Image (cartoon, rainbow, N blue to C red):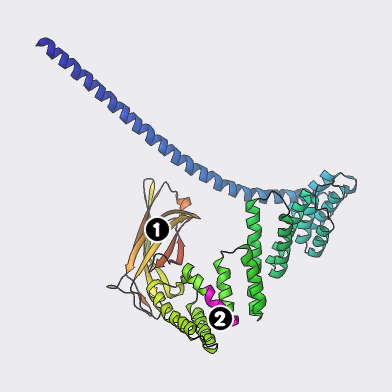
Amino acid sequence: MIKERKEKYRKDKKKDFENELLGYLRTATISFIAAAVFTILLSFHARSEMIKNLYVQKGERLKFERQLAKKIVAHSDYTKSLSDSNYSICLQVGRLYETAGDYQKAEYAYYLAMQKAPNGVYTPYYKLVVTLIELGKIEEAEKLINQVQDMSDINLIRFKTRAYIVIGDKYMADSKYLKAAEHYEKANYYYSRLKRQDKVVKKSLEGRLVNSYIEAAGVIVKNGYNRDAVRFLKKALKYDPDNNIIKYRLAIIYADLDPIKSVEYFEYLMEKIPQDIDPNVYNTALIKAANINDIEGNNIKAKFYRYRIHSLDLFINNKIIYKDEIETYISSFEVKKVLFRYKIKAALKFQNNSARDINKMSAEFILRQKEHKKDEKTVHCVSKKNPLYSNGAKTKDVEVSFWGNIFTKKDLVNYYIDIYLYKDPKYKTFVGSFNIPSKSFYSSN
């Protein structure tokens, strides 16, 4: 009996020791994991701070370099002995004067560097083109580009691509959109001859082409040349076939030129971005299309277009909120810090400025840090029991709050809340955005 008790006591003691050891190990493991997670979070925060500081430092560095260059060139004229200097010195002197903002002397230095450059080296050509553009000598810059013709040289192709982009950018800045498009087309022509292409560069170049053609079409429409505007918009569509802005502009222009074609574009857009199109223009295109079919004796098609007018009204009433119908007011806003967290709390009102009652509406709030989405909240704010009446009626306060981890007061100025309203979650309408202040404030309406 005594032996059995001793054995039981020994086993119990061993079990207690094992349990105690497991407890210590568990506590140590949890502490280690918590410390590791906290360290990782802090490292991410430190990394983001470092990246932001790098951008700040870059701007400060450029400013410092310009000031230093101005001081250096103020004491001596480094262009006097350049005719006897080699290519590298001429290039560096050109860069010095370009940094200092003295483009006349930079032009001279780059011209000498270009003459002395080894075969296949086009850096001074490009630098001279940029300098000539700064001096407003665009025709001279174009002549310089055109005087080199060897299309077998990859460096030359790259030089011409970059040079034509720079000239195109200058024309865009001067609102000469067709000229800009012409030079972007040239840049695209040369870039397409490269066997190895960078996707980012290609996308950037195509984006420039699209924007220049869209802007050019806008100017041409104002002057009454709708068919030419269509031609340029279709060129833009060739580079960006999924661009709904281009298709919308085509739909508007075709409402006068070819209503049936306009309806085709509007039918597509009503599936994609109904909240962003003008229903009155679409309605007009439908009426004209119906009348055309009546004249042509196609009564069935005419009835179809008139039916679409009726269904359009129902669709809008049940599905769509337009941005210009709603006005947003901030009733109150506050930011509170609790340890490593910030509580962001806002109360807003929405005013219905349209001529129709709204019986269903939700608000989606998205918290983002610059372009990075951090959190989102949805609040149902209008219903059949609590409608938002027409002509200036406001909702009650719509409240939303977010919790953020390991923010700093400095970070908060880079945070924004975007607001989307919708009846149907498929068709959300962006109605506004406001930034997060570094301290709480209150306002009332």
Query: In this view of the protein, which residue sits in the foreground, 228 or 81?
Result: 228
Left or right of 278: which side holds 203? Answer: right
Please provide the residue range marked out in magenta. 256-265
Query: In this view of the protein, which residue sits in the foreground, 412 or 214?
Result: 214
- Is residue 445 something that shows in the picture? no
Q: Position of residue 267 (x, y in %)?
A: 49, 73
Q: Position of residue 128 (x, y in %)?
A: 80, 55
Q: Position of residue 220 (x, y in %)?
A: 66, 76
Which amino acid, by three-letter code, is at mark 1? Ser
Q: What residue occupies the far right of the structure in this picture? A: 84
Residue designated by label 2: 259
- Is residue 296 something that shows in the picture? yes
Residue 77, compared with residue 181, is above or below; it is above
Query: In this view of the protein, which residue sits in the foreground, 194 or 412?
Result: 194
Query: In this view of the protein, which residue sits in the foreground, 93 or 178?
Result: 178
Which amino acid, by three-letter code, is at mark 2? Pro
Residue designated by label 1: 440
Q: Secondary structure at mark 2?
A: helix
Residue 423: which quarter of the image?
bottom left
Left or right of 136: which side holds 260? Answer: left
